[in-house]
Every structure is written in structure tokens, then in C-alpha cells.
Image: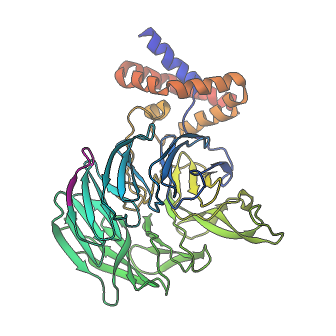
Amino acid sequence: MRKQIKITVIFFLLVLFSTPATSQTQGSLAWNSDIGVEGFSWSTPIVINNSLYMQDQEGGIGCYNATTGTRTWYVKIADEYPVTSPVYNNEKLYMFAGDTVYRINPLDGIIEKQFSVEGKYPGPGAPAVTDTTMFFTTSDTVYAIDTVGFTQKWSKTIRAKDLIVTGNILLVMSDKLYALNTSDGSEIWNLAAPAGDDGFDQAGLSGTNLAVYTYSGYYSSTLYLYQLSSANDTAPALIWSNVMTENYQAHSPPTIASGTVLSTSREGVLKAYSVTDSTSLWEREIRESGYAPAMPIAVDGKVYVQDEIMGSSSRKNSPLEVVVPVLVCLDITTGALDWNSSASDNMGISWGQPAAANNIIYVATDHAKGLFAYHAGTLNNSWYMFKHNPSLTGSDNDWEPSVSDSDCPAERLLGRNAPELNILRHYRDKVLAKSNLGKDMIGYYYKNSDAVNKIIDENPTIKITAQTLLAGILPFITLVSQ
């Protein structure tokens, strides 16, 4: 017991955690790193605790330290060129490559299970995953796979564009909007596409508000807002619609946050609507028309999306100014610019969504050294992966990943979003990291955080004592950090 207390006390003296300090300038570059081998990816990063997972177009997936950008492992899964994004649920990664879906151990990248659909290729987006079932779509079929044994539960011949799980309902966007029972695939209801539209495409869900695109041919989309019934046993009611000009949304899902629907299309314009009506709150041109759209996320009333500004680029063999991609932070209510990253960072084009966690915004771009991390100030919430969560709702709901013993001990004691964490992060980066002894302490923490977590979890008395000690040393840490 005395040794356990000693280890716990040492932990508080180290005050090291797996997330960065928040005193950095917003929009400043924290780090950037290579993606895969050649640097190409259409995927959205996954950030869980202090690990970032990135799928590339070469059929591989890598794990990075989310604080430093150092790659800890990389595994070549298949000789294919996936354009989907992986998801995370219950301490497992789920990834599509070629005609096979994989369950991967996030600790080492080892393939645990795989399921082949024999020559069929995945639809756009990502698989939707619950605690018991993974749902994914190919060119003509929706599949439900048991997440433990990786055996097929059921399949249904539907050419789906997108999937969302809500309770025991699987929403399938296709020629119609289908609601299927997650347990057996039986149809509960369907909604025909509105007159003039060919079918439903990418969607986002917040509560009972379903924002969904329709498509007509290839070059026209309309954004609809439907209200699902409370029991979800009947087709939804239409609230409003808005034509997205003559430009297809091209697999960019709507994002719903703070009572606002965010949408982009090949028109190159980010538009914000109230969920209550189709009135445009604001819009901003963010990408040249005709390209696949940039995908926004929203956290804490802020919108993060890739934009373009005039600047010079070391990747261009020209002395003239060129259009350079940057990350921007916008107010979700007004669209006003809060900050943007520097054009000198030389970002490539991003084809996925950013991710937000650890007070950092992570962006994957399509060129060498294409994984970027930017300081965002204090983030009280996160956007962990494509469409935020494994249910693929695309909304700022309260989903949090399940992480057993790998999370930060201080977060375990104080709470993931406790403001006191920023004091300790500042001390770690501004005091401890300035000396060799402090750097050794940081290394000790990363090596032994799981052991400290185990002690805390198994000894309630030590946990209470540790919380008291931590509260007691905070004034001292604040003083010496000034």
C-alpha cells in the first residue's frame, strides 16, 4: 500500500498528461507528419485520448501520438485504395479496404477479424457501429455484421448512400429513406424521395432533426430537414427544404450543431441554416467551385473547416501568389472569422472532415507531410471521427469513447473537461519540459500512467486522497508556472 501511495504522489508531482497546453496561439501549428507512405488520404482522422488513427489510400492505417505527431505503428492492410473513413467503438477500429472490412486492435494495428463481401466495394462514408453490430453498405447491399464473431447477421438489397444508427433503427439513405430494424433488417417505414429527386444521399441527425441531401442526376442537390417521430415508427414530417444550386453535394455530410445545419457542395460555399426554417443565417466561399467540397465540423459554437486564401507556397514552383488551403475557425452564429492557420504551413487539399480533441484540431490533407495539428484554445467538447461518432449522426451529441485504462489519470480524477487541467498542462509544457529532469519525468509518466490508473481504480481510498492532494498542490503549480 505504501508503494502504491508513493507512485500516486509521484504522479502528481509530475502532472503530465496526454493533451497539449492551451496557452498556444490559436491557429498555430502544433505539428505535422507523414500519412502512410506516399501521403495520400481521403479519410478523416480518429482521435481517442492521446492516439490518432489515420487511414490512407494505399490500404494502410497508422497510429500517431496526438500530442507530438510521432507515428507509433503502421500496418499495411490491403493493396487497395480506400476512400472511406474508419471508425472507433468499444476500443476497436473498424476499417474498409478493398472488398473486406476489418476489426483492428488500436494498440498495435493487428487485424483481429475480417469479413469479405467478395468483389463488392464499399459505399461512401464509413461503417456505422454499435456495441453489438457493424453496418456497412456496398454498391447494392446493406450488411449487418456481429462485432464479436464477425459473422453476418443479415443483409438487404439496397443501394445505400449513407447510414445512421439511432436506437434500434438503422436509417438508410437510398432511392428512398428507409428505417430498418437493427436486429433483423426488417423494414419499419420508408419515405419516397420528393418529386423531381432521384433519391437520398448524405445525412446528419441531431435528436429528432434529420438533415439529408437528395440528388437529381449528378449536378443537383437539395437539402431537406425532416422531423422524426418520437417513437420513430412512422415516416418523418418535412420541415423545410433548400436547393443547393446546380451543384451536387458530393458525399459531404451535413453537420448539425448548436441548432444550426452546416452544408457544403461543389459550389464551394459553406452555408448555415437554422434547424427551424430554411433561412440562410450566413454563407462563406471556402473552395473553388467544381471541386469536391470541404467538410465542416462544429465544436463549442465554433466551425472548423478548410478554406482557401491567397498566399505563396513552397510546393509551387512560381514566385506569384497562389490559392493556398488553410484551416479556419468561424463563429457558428454569425460566420465571423475567429482565426485561420498560416498559409506558410503548406497544407494540401483535405477531402475528409477535421477532428477535434485535446484542444487541437487535426486535419488530413492529400500530400506528403499531410497530417496537420493546430492549437485551438480550450475545447470543452470533441469531434472524434468522421461524423463525430460511430453511429454516424454528424451532430454535436454527448457521445464519448469508452477507454478502459489508457486515459489520463488527472482526467480520471478531475473529469475530462475540468478547467484545472489547463493549469497542469501549462506547468507540464512551460516548466517541466524546459529541463532534462522534467523531460525524464514526462517520459516516466507516459510509461506508468496505466499503472497509476489501475491503482486509482482499485483503491477508492487512494483515489480520494489523490484528489485531495491534487487540489492542494494546484495553487503552488499556478504560482511556479507564472
For image coordinates 82% across by 72% down, the residue present is 320
Q: Position of residue 376 (x, y in %)?
A: 60, 52
For image coordinates 68% across by 59% down, the residue present is 341
Report if residue 208 is visible in the image: yes
Quadrant of the image containing the C terminus? top right
Left or right of 101 on screen, residue 358: right
Q: Position of residue 75 (x, y in %)?
A: 49, 44
Report if residue 229 is visible in the image: no
Q: Position of residue 480 (x, y in %)?
A: 69, 28
Q: Nearer the viewer, residue 464 or 313?
A: 313
Colour basis: rainbow
Occupied quadrant, residue 290: bottom right
Give the vertical position of 67 relative to 266 (above or below): above
Q: Nearer the viewer, residue 290 or 410?
A: 290
Image: magenta residue range: 147-154
Left or right of 380 on screen, residue 130: left
Q: Nearer the viewer, residue 391 or 475?
A: 391
Q: Would residue 424 be counted in the magenta stretch?
A: no
